[in-house]
Image: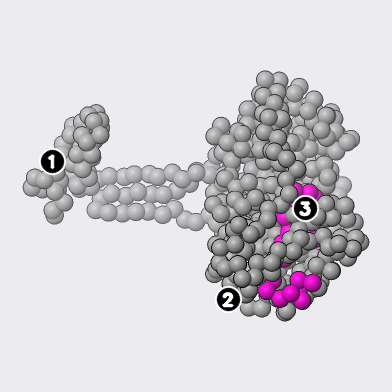
Amino acid sequence: MESLLTRVDLRGKGSDVRDHLPRAHSSGDEPVEAVREIIESVRSGGDAAVLELTARFDGAPPSLVVDPAEVAAAVERIDPQVRASLEFAAANVEAFHQSQLTADHEFRSDGLTVTGTRRPVDRAGCYVPGGRASYPSTVLMTVVPARVAGVPEVVLCSPPGPDGKLPDETLAAAHIAGAHAVYACGGAQAVAAMAYGTESIPPVDVIVGPGNVYVAVAKREVAGLVGVPSSFAGPSEIVVVADASTPVDFAAIDIVVQAEHGPGGQAWLVTWDEAVADAVTERIDKIATEALRADDIRSTLSTGGFVALVDDPEAAIEVANRIAPEHLQLMCDDPDALVDLVRHAGEVFLGPLAPASLGDYVAGPSHVLPTSGTARFAGPLTTEDFSKPLHIVRVDQTAFDRLGPHVAVLADVEGLDCHAQSVRLRGITEVGTAGEGDGSS
């Protein structure tokens, strides 16, 4: 049987392997025009358009707005063990994001004080995928950071199933995470509804959360009208760096884990040991035959699965940096010796006991991570995505006397007379004359 993973031999290719790395197969151009039609339909048609599109693509909900009592009741309906795990995960996610809230910082200089702080947005919209499966973990990973950031209103959109309802686990997670409202709609139409607002769904200031290519393109289309993190949160990706010390079963299952999410993603094994490549590849082929979601796994790996052979550990990390994956697992001997070489990845997991699945559920950081190479310039979802910096400037007479003359000089250069007058009217000594204006003390 032909292996699912495409082998890429990078040995002897030197340090710049960019031109030798394949990209995952694309079924065609991004559906930009289709997404734009959906967005315009929602923008002009409001609730009616969202309901029609939701019924067409997912299931027909009785209402876009999920009754808050139904959301709260779902906590009692789900399996007690599932509830306990959701509450455990939510507590870890909250504790991690609380740790990210640093104290206000100040810059002081001779009577000038600039205090740096942050202010949350007024309303955040969290998108949670559905359809193929339910993802209560994504509810926690988006709603909790928003709430920790201090956002007064956090709303959630997720596509309903064929029965028009959201899974109890999704509703229960929304209640546990502290979502203020839940709406039964998904896809590009949900993004458009949150961006422009409808009769039922209020417009938000920030939209976060992963989704398929329609969701990702829709977020990009409305970016600027609302805040959208710069990362492209699309199909799942992983790079596993392995050597002879790596348990073959661990490496194989961790590569399959991300492929389990379905088509469009990438899964890489990178190693400098050909025997490891052979053993892990063989085990992956076996898992992909026996797994419950075998069709999704085989579909993903047949187009986006690769095994790269490199010269040494440093070359392996360079390949990982070029891919800039969502998840990077250093499952090799002494991973701490390599982690400082990592420049581009959404999240890094060290050692055989740190599978990416821990990050997917309970480690604490959000599992909403950059994909499609956007880890080159973007990072994981954090509380900062729900807030923005605010600088507060205080000036006493000493500072004004020192700074004002320079304002006048620069304003004159730029031809902005009123800017210059704003300091001259307050009384300044021109730069270059005796006194504070020339920087003397």
**SS of the residue at dot 2?**
helix
Between circles 3 and 2, the one closer to the viewer is 3
278 versus 27 height, above or below: below
Quarter of the picture containing the N terminus is: bottom right
Please name the residue that numbered disc 2 is placed on.
Answer: 337
- State the image coordinates of residue 36 (x, y, percent, origin top left): 67, 29
- Label 3 close to label 2 by CB (< 8 Å): no
Outermost residue on the front side: it is: 12
From mark 3 to mark 2, how far is it between C-alphas?
32 Å
Please name the residue that numbered disc 1 is placed on.
Answer: 430
From mark 2 to mark 1, how far is it between C-alphas?
57 Å
Q: Is residue 439 visible?
A: yes
Q: Nearer the viewer, residue 43 or 315?
A: 315
Earlier sequence position, callout 2 versus callout 1: 2
Q: Identify the mark at residue 303; answer none if there is no mark.
A: 3
> Would you say residue 274 sits in the magenta stretch?
yes
Image quadrant in which you'd find residue 66: top right
Q: Nearer the viewer, residue 128 or 247?
A: 247
Q: Nearer the viewer, residue 413 or 85?
A: 413
> Would you say residue 364 sits in the magenta stretch?
no
User: How did the renderer colour the structure?
Assistant: one colour
Residue type at mark 3 is Thr
Disc 2 packing (10 Å; few <14; some 14–19; many ≥20): few
Q: Residue at x 65, y 27 (%)?
A: 197
* Residue range highlighted in magenta: 256-278
